[in-house]
Image (cartoon, helix red, strand yellow):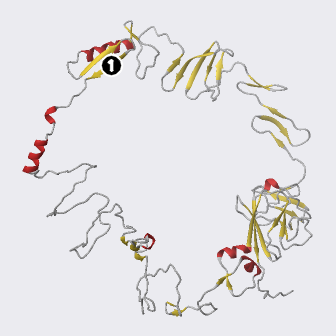
């Protein structure tokens, strides 16, 4: 039986040696274009041209004149002649273009130039522009916007400009336009009757200077001490009162009774008192903090140690984990903090947790895991994973990856031999190797040996790949160790 291929085979210009074309007594059914076979009846090779089977080899049976040609024949020497036409003359040695053209209807080219000689031309080489060149100078340019650009343009009649007019100098009735505007604006400001603003036209530098008089304070707006006392005695009504500035300290010698709310907008409240009485049963922290988000991390209470600040006791809220954090938790000598502790939520132990027995979800957790019980395990090293025989350690994702090696092959670095050697150091010849094109990501077929680059010396640490012909793109080799695999397969020979 034959091996069936459902994808094309690219031999990369290598020889197909000792090949035999399919032998058939008649043409195969359901042919495809390009298919070939050898007919054993008439000893002829046929190929499919898309619609019929055509024999390979034999004499030419005829030459037919195509479009623009005459002649042809089916036997002997055959001649084909080129036919002339409008504007084209077929001569004995060439095909010439007639000098006087009367039938051409359009000439279009992005670099078209029409001219009398090299200095006087009409040029179409710039998009959306027609440039007239006279005496080797580009004098006038017509643009798609309607703009006409010229180094010098003399218009004897009227000029109507709907867009922008740019000029180095403009004269109105013999007077330069900038001087005309300066004279007009300067006269406007000079006639201003306001006492606070005056204008002076500076003809020397062509500018207009505006002068604003100094503003003096209004003495009637001053606030006297007597006026302030009157205000304090009569009250301020609904107006706010500010006492002292940022550098003043206000001292109240006797009791201060505030019948309304007290709002302090400073940074610190210091209470140097022997007794602090708070009627409210609940103290709210972080209520008006700038950290008003749901995180509000770090809110709590700190009790300072007067001797050592490092031993300050804190009770802080950990918003990220929704729990309180105690900085100190201490038991009396010979006593336990808790005889029995039932925690309904999470428990976070930053130190060491010691226990005689540990149960998770009703199942006991052993100190050493077995095949049938949960417990502690030891992770296998990469070397132990490569050995493939340890039954007491657990393989992790990173150590499992040690059983595989990938290598990129730069085709530009291949020598004439087109052979590469990859060192994998997996320590076994029981490896699987696959090579694929990094651009198309398709598997490619090549000669692979578990040897050094001479293809004769066996090796458990390197493989050699012979491409025959250099691939068109860089490739990647995938090498996986099967060392330690159970040799339980049976082989039957028929």
Picture quarter with the C terminus: bottom right
| Residue ID for mark 1 | 209
Q: Is residue 232 above or below residue 37?
A: above
* Residue found at the very far left of the displayed protein: 234
Secondary structure beneath label 1 = strand
Give whichever of 455, 444 is nearer the camera. Answer: 455
The quadrant holding residue 12 is bottom right
The quadrant holding residue 330 is bottom left
> Mark 1 Cα within 10 Å, few/some/many (few <14, many 20+)?
few
> Residue 102, image x and y in percent?
66, 21
* Residue 344 placement, left or right of 217: right
The quadrant holding residue 396 is bottom right
Picture quarter with the N terminus: bottom right
> Residue 312, image x and y in percent?
41, 72
Write the residue at 28% across / 18% down. 199
Write the residue at 49% across / 22% down. 147
Q: Is residue 32 visible?
A: no
* Residue 78 placement, left or right of 310: right
């Amino acid at each position: 039986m034959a091996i069936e291929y459902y994808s094309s085979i690219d031999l990369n210009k290598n020889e197909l040696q000792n090949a035999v074309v399919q032998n058939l007594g008649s043409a195969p059914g359901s042919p495809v274009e390009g298919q070939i076979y050898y007919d054993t009846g008439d000893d002829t090779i046929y190929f499919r041209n898309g619609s019929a089977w055509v024999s390979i080899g034999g004499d030419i049976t005829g030459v037919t004149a195509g479009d623009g040609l005459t002649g042809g024949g089916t036997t002997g020497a055959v001649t084909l002649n080129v036919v002339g036409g409008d504007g084209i003359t077929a001569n004995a040695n060439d095909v010439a273009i007639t000098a006087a053209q009367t039938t051409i209807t359009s000439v279009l080219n992005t670099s078209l130039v029409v001219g009398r000689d090299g200095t006087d031309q009409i040029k179409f080489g710039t998009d959306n522009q027609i440039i007239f060149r006279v005496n080797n100078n580009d004098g006038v340019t017509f643009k798609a916007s309607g703009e006409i650009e010229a180094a010098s343009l003399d218009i004897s009649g009227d000029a109507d400009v709907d867009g922008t007019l740019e000029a180095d100098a403009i004269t109105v009735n013999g007077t330069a336009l900038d001087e005309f505007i300066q004279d007009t604006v300067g006269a406007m400001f000079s006639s201003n009757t306001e006492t606070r603003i005056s204008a002076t036209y500076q003809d020397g530098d062509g500018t207009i200077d505006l002068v604003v008089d100094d503003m003096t304070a209004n003495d009637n707006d001053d606030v006297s001490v007597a006026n302030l006392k009157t205000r304090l005695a009569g009250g301020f009504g609904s107006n706010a009162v500010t006492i002292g500035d940022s550098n003043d300290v206000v001292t109240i010698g006797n009791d201060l009774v505030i019948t309304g709310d007290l709002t302090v907008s400073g940074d610190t409240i210091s209470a140097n008192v022997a007794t602090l009485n708070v009627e409210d049963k609940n103290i709210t922290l972080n209520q008006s903090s700038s950290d008003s988000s749901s995180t509000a991390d770090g809110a709590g209470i700190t009790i300072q140690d007067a001797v050592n600040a490092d031993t300050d006791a804190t009770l802080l809220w950990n918003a990220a984990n929704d729990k309180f954090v105690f900085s100190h938790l201490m038991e009396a000598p010979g006593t336990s903090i808790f005889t029995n502790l039932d925690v309904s939520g999470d428990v976070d132990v930053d130190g060491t947790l010691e226990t005689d027995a540990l149960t998770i979800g009703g199942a006991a957790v052993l100190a050493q895991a077995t095949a049938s019980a949960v417990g502690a395990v030891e992770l296998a090293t990469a070397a132990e994973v490569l050995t493939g025989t340890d039954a007491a350690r657990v393989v992790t994702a990173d150590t499992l990856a040690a059983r595989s090696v990938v290598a990129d092959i730069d085709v530009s670095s291949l020598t004439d031999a087109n052979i590469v050697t990859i060192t994998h150091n997996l320590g076994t010849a029981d490896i699987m190797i696959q090579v694929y094109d990094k651009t198309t990501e398709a598997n490619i077929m090549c000669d692979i040996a578990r040897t050094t680059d001479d293809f004769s010396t066996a090796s458990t640490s390197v493989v050699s790949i012979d491409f025959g012909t250099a691939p068109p793109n860089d490739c990647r080799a995938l090498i996986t160790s099967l060392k330690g695999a159970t040799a339980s397969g049976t082989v039957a020979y028929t």
